[in-house]
Image (spheres, helix red, strand yellow):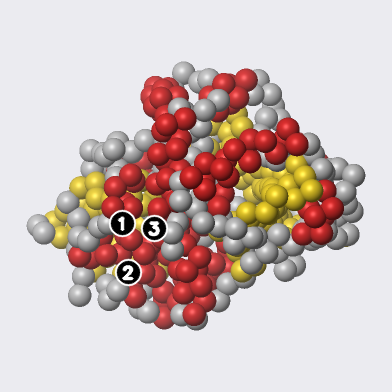
Amino acid sequence: MQRVAVIGAGVIGVACAYELARAGAEVVLVDAGTVGQGASRGNTGWVTPSFSYPLAAPGVVRQGLRSALDRDGALVLRPVPDPSYLRWLWRFRERCTTERFAEATRALAALNTRTIELLDAYAADGVPFEMHAGGLVVAARTEAGLGTYRQLFAELRRAGHESRLEDLDRDQLVAVEPALDPGAVSCGLHCVTDRFVRPESLVAGLLGRARALGVEVREDVRVDRIARIGSDIVVAGERVDRALIATGVGSVALAATLGVRLPILGAKGYSITASGSGTAPSTALYLAEAKVGVSGYRDAVRIAGVFELPGRDTTIDRRRIGVFVDRAVGYLADWRPDASTMESWAGLRPATPDGLPLIGEIAPRVFVASGHGMLGVTLAPATAALVAPLILDGRTGPELAPFAPGR
C-alpha cells in the first residue's frame, strides 16, 4: 500500500485525499490551520461547468488596469513594483487573446465533462453536504449588460458544453428567481444543469468520509519543505511514498524548496454570509453589471465579489464589502441582510496567468494540484478523480495535458 501525504486541506486537498483513500492509498492529510478555513470557506460554492472560463480574456488587462485607481472596482489589476507580479502580468497579457481564451475554455470544458456525475457520486457514497440544483441565473439590468455573457456562453457551447441554456426576458427571469426586483432587471440567462453547494458542508462531508476510509488528518501542522531520506519523501516528519501539494497560494513557497517556480498569485476576494428579511435568492445568481455572485443556502445567503491582484493579505475591508453588498441588493426585490448575523470573509484565490490550474508532477513523486482561481469547487471533483490514478499508478489522460505545471 502506498502512503501519500496531501498538503493542504481546502476543497481540492480534501477531495484528493478522499479519492486517494478510495483507490486504496494510505493517506495523511496535513494543513497549517484548520481544515477548510482558507479560500474554500467563503466562496459561493458554485458547481458551474456552464460558467467555467479563464480570467485571461480579450480586454481584461485594459479593464483591470483602468480600475487600478478605483477603490470599488470589481476586477482590479494594481501596478506594483514586484518582479514576480510583473512576470505574472506579462504572461497573463500574452494569454488574453481570442485564440488562447478559446483554447483554455475548451480545456476547462473537457476537465468538467464528469463534474456533475462525480458530485452525485459523492452523495451516493454517503458524503453529506448541502447541494442545490436550481441552476445558474445570470441577471442583467440591460441588454448591453448581458451581451458579454451571451458571447461567453456561445464560446462555451463551441468548446463542447452541452448544458441547457435558456434566454429569459424580465418576466421569465423573475419567475425563475423570485428574489429579483422586476424594476431593476430586464433580461437574463438560465443555465439549467448547473448546481451550487455550501462549500463548508462539502469539505466537512468529504473529510468525514475520508476519515472513515482511514485518512489521517493533522491540523495546525505547517509544512515548510519537502525533504528526502533515501527513497522516502519526508513531510512534517512523516515518511511517505508520494506527496501532493494542494495549498493554493502557499504552493509557491513549498514548490520553491524543490527548485520549482509555480506561476501562482493570490487574488483577493470578499464575501458576506447572512440571514435576512424578505424573499431570499434560491439559485446561484450572477449579477452581470455588478460582477457579484449570490448563493441562496438553506439558512443564509452568501454574496461574494472582487478579484483584486495582487492580493497581499486577508484583512477585511468593511467599506469594500459594503459597496458590493449594496450593489447586489440593488438587484433584489426586498431581501436585505440582517447586520447582526453577518459574517464577513476575505481570502486569496490562487490565480495562474492563463486561468488554468496546475495539475501534475513537479519533482520525482511530488505532485501539485493548485491554481484553481475562482473555480475550486467546480473543478475539485474532476481534479481529484484524475489526480488519484496519476499519483498511484502514473496514469494520465489527454484532459490533463493543458494543466501540466511546466507548460
Q: Are marks 2 and 1 in contact (CB under 8 Å)?
A: yes
To which quarter of the image does residue 356 belong? top left
The answer to which image quadrant residue 381 occupies is: bottom left
Label 3 vs 1, first from the N-terminus: 1
Residue marked by disc 3? 383
Percent coordinates x, y for residue 295 in the rendering: 69, 57
Q: Quadrant of residue 62?
A: top right
Q: Secondary structure at mark 1?
A: strand
Q: Which residue is mark 2?
A: 20
Is disc 3 surrounded by few (<14), some (14 to 19) or many (20+) residues within 10 Å? Answer: many
Residue 68 appears at what percent x and percent y?
A: 61, 22
- The reply to whether residue 89 is in sight is no
| Residue 105 shown left or right of residue 143 in the figure | left
Q: Considering only vertical position in the picture, is 274 above or below 214?
A: above
Give amino acid for label 2. Answer: Leu
Q: Tag 3, which secondary structure?
A: helix
Mark 2 vs 1, N-terminal side: 2
